[in-house]
Image (cartoon, rainbow, N blue to C red):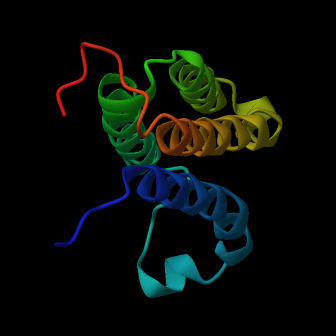
Amino acid sequence: MFKINYDALGIAASVACAIHCAVLPLLMSSLPILGINIINNVFFEYGMILLAAAIGIYSLMHGFKKHHHQYTPIIIFSIGIVLLLLKQAIDSYRIVLLIPAVMLIICAHVINYLNCRKANHCHTNDCTH
């Protein structure tokens, strides 16, 4: 049976977001020639943030409810998402806010993954499996 590791998917989405933000400015001169306009496209930027948030929320809530019952990954992830949103709002601090945001989101997924593995057989009474 095929199971999706949502923490790995969340890490991949965060890394994709970081690559998008770091590499895309380097390709700025060639994208208009190709007819692609995703540089400073507000809808695309917020779409990427919403995608990372949706995957992260699902992954972290699954780990919280079914395995470890710890708030730490959720708090770290939330701070990362807030920093991503601030990155969009405060243009002059884009890179300064991007790097810690992505690092926090990745750390939240890693902590969630490790907590799920550590708590695999030490469930409390409210677990559903």
Residue 13: x and y in percent read 48, 56
Quadrant housing residue 105: top right
13 left or right, relative to 75: left
Residue 20: x and y in percent read 59, 62
Of residues 34 and 72, the one nearer the viewer is 72
Q: Farthest right residue?
A: 96
32 left or right, relative to 125: right
Residue at the (72%, 61%) spot, across then down: 22
What is the tally of numbered marks visible in this picture?
A: 0
Residue 101: x and y in percent read 68, 35
Residue at the (45%, 66%) spot, across then down: 37
Considering the image in quadrants, where does the C terminus appear? top left
Residue 86 drawn above or below residue 10: above
Of residues 11 and 125, the one nearer the viewer is 125
Residue 114: x and y in percent read 59, 43
Considering the image in quadrants, where does the N terminus appear? bottom left
Residue 20 drawn above or below residue 59: below
Residue 50 drawn above or below residue 30: above
Residue at the (17%, 27%) spot, across then down: 128
Residue at the (62%, 37%) spot, across then down: 111
46 left or right, relative to 73: left
Of residues 126 and 35, the one nearer the viewer is 126
Quadrant housing residue 90: top right
